[in-house]
Amino acid sequence: MVITVICGILAALCTAYYIVIISYAGTSATFSLVWLFAAAMFAVAAAAAFIIKRRHITVPTGLKAAFGALLAAAVIFFAVVEGLIISGMNYKTESGLDYVIVLGAQVRGTRITKSLAKRLEKALWYLENNPETVAVVSGGQGTGEDISEAQAMRDYLVSKGISEDRIIMEDKSTNTGENIDFSMKLIEEDKKTDSPRIGIITNNFHVYRAVKICEGKGYGVNGIAAPSDGILFVNCMVREFFAVVKYKLSGAI
């Protein structure tokens, strides 16, 4: 009965969080359907546990032990990866960097989304406090975007008083790997020193992966964590778990 109750509560929580996400960010919110899938899985598990208990079905001890071990391993693996993601949130921000790469995020039409706004606010703070630093705003134009993410970011920073001379646009990339490759190429063309010091600005949950991708490509960078949206934070953390695993399996990090 305990398992039935726990799984039932988890199913209800996942359903409730899905409703919160789509109410806040719309039905197109990235990764939101996973919470409905999780709710369904927990509901099935609750029903199965209830039926087994009600009908006094005996589950072999070996099967229960194997399931318990598999579940424990999955929880530990998830916790380890999430710990790595959290470690990226605490990287020390270095001052006086020559360049900061600001990673793009979705733009709706020409409107900056909440996630991207957080990155830009951090970039603005850094540029105001480090007047010699040049920003590379990185992000192409995707579905539902009337302008490139780079253009939206440039327009925002200029509107806040940052000189156009301090902004380099990289508007061809479609993923984090391309963000880094294309931005580094522009820095190489622009650099005024042989070994420029470079930072990378993104939302806190994304810093670990971004820095590790850079390291995998042979670039040493300083990760600079911008805040993330509080309501979507759990969704982003779970999504990032799968992203880190995917990039690790592909050899990108």
Image (cartoon, helix red, strand yellow):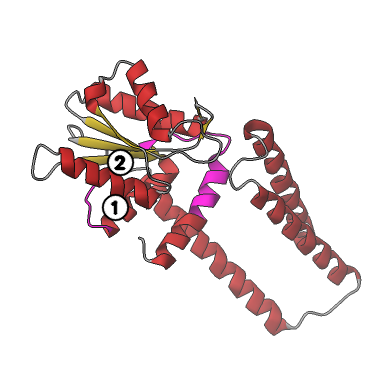
Image-quadrant location for residue 20:
top right
Q: Which residue is mark 2?
A: 200
In the picture, measured across the screen, residue 89 lies left or right of residue 49, that is left
The residues colored magenta run: 217-241
For image coordinates 81% across by 67% down, the residue present is: 48
Q: Could you say which is closer to the camera, residue 136 or residue 66?
A: 136
The type of residue carrying mark 1 is Cys
Q: Relative to residue 180, is residue 246 depicted above or below?
A: below
Q: Is residue 31 magenta?
A: no
Q: Which residue is rendered at x = 64% and y = 79% of the image?
A: 66
Query: Are there few (<14), some (14-19), or many (20+) residues within 10 Å of tag 2?
Result: many
Identify which residue is drawn at 85% across, 64% down: 50
Task: Please report whichever mark, 2 or 1, sits nearer to the chain's N-terminal start.
Answer: 2
Give coordinates of residue 139: x percent, y percent.
Answer: 39, 39
Image point 73% across, 60% down: which residue? 41
Secondary element under disc 2, as helix, strand or loop, is strand
Q: Which residue is mark 1?
A: 214
Q: Nearer the viewer, residue 141 or 49?
A: 141
164 is higher (above) or lower (below) than 206: above
Count neighbours of disc 1 (C-alpha within 10 A) and say few if under 14, some if 14 to 19, many if 20 or more.
many
Q: What's under tag 2, amino acid-wise?
A: Ile
Give the tally of numbered discs: 2
